């Protein structure tokens, strides 16, 4: 049960950092994440803040900058998969160590 609280708090901190990178209020998104967690993460991932327009939805295919992502570099793709796999593996080992 404690790991769920730690994960929820970590998600709130990550969302606050993402909001800060995007020019939004980190404190607002931190407290919003404490109460609505993954919904705030989805809102951060699918919208961006533009000073003249306010919140604008992002085209999920072309991304924030309006250009299609380059998926032709397999080395970077495999490197990302390897890093996230290692993070997940060590996370599971740590959680099993707690029990």
Image (spheres, rainbow, N blue to C red):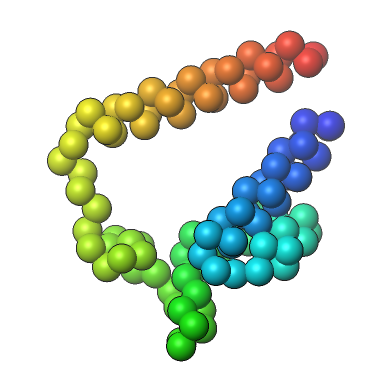
Give x and y (percent) for residue 26: 67, 62
Tell me if 7 is positioned left or right of 71 in this view.
right
Name the image quarter holding the N terminus.
Answer: top right
Name the image quarter holding the C terminus.
Answer: top right
Q: Is residue 16 above or below residue 92?
A: below
Tell me if 34 is positioned left or right of 78 in this view.
right
Q: Can see residue 39? A: no
Q: Is residue 15 above or below residue 71?
A: below
Q: Can see residue 23? A: yes
Q: Is residue 23 above or below residue 39?
A: below
Give x and y (percent) for residue 49: 50, 75
| Residue sitting at the far left | 72
Give x and y (percent) for residue 64: 36, 65
Q: Is residue 4 above or below residue 87?
A: below
Observer-nearest of 78 and 22: 22
Using the rendered view, name the quadrant where residue 74 is placed.
top left
Give x and y (percent) for residue 55: 51, 79
Residue at image coords 77%, 37%: 6
| Residue sitting at the far right | 2
Residue at image coords 54%, 18%: 89
Residue at image coords 43%, 26%: 83
Using the rendered view, name the quadrant where residue 73 is placed.
top left
Observer-nearest of 93 and 79: 79
Observer-nearest of 20 and 54: 20
């Amino acid at each position: 049960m404690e790991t769920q609280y730690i994960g929820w708090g970590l998600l709130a901190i990550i969302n606050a950092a993402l909001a800060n990178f995007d020019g939004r209020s980190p404190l607002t998104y931190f407290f919003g994440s404490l109460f609505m967690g993954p919904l705030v993460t989805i809102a951060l991932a699918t919208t961006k803040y533009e000073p003249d327009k306010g919140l604008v939805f992002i085209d999920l295919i072309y991304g924030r900058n309006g250009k299609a992502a380059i998926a032709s570099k397999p080395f970077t793709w495999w490197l990302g998969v390897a890093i996230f796999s290692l993070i997940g593996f060590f996370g599971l080992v740590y959680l099993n160590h707690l029990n």
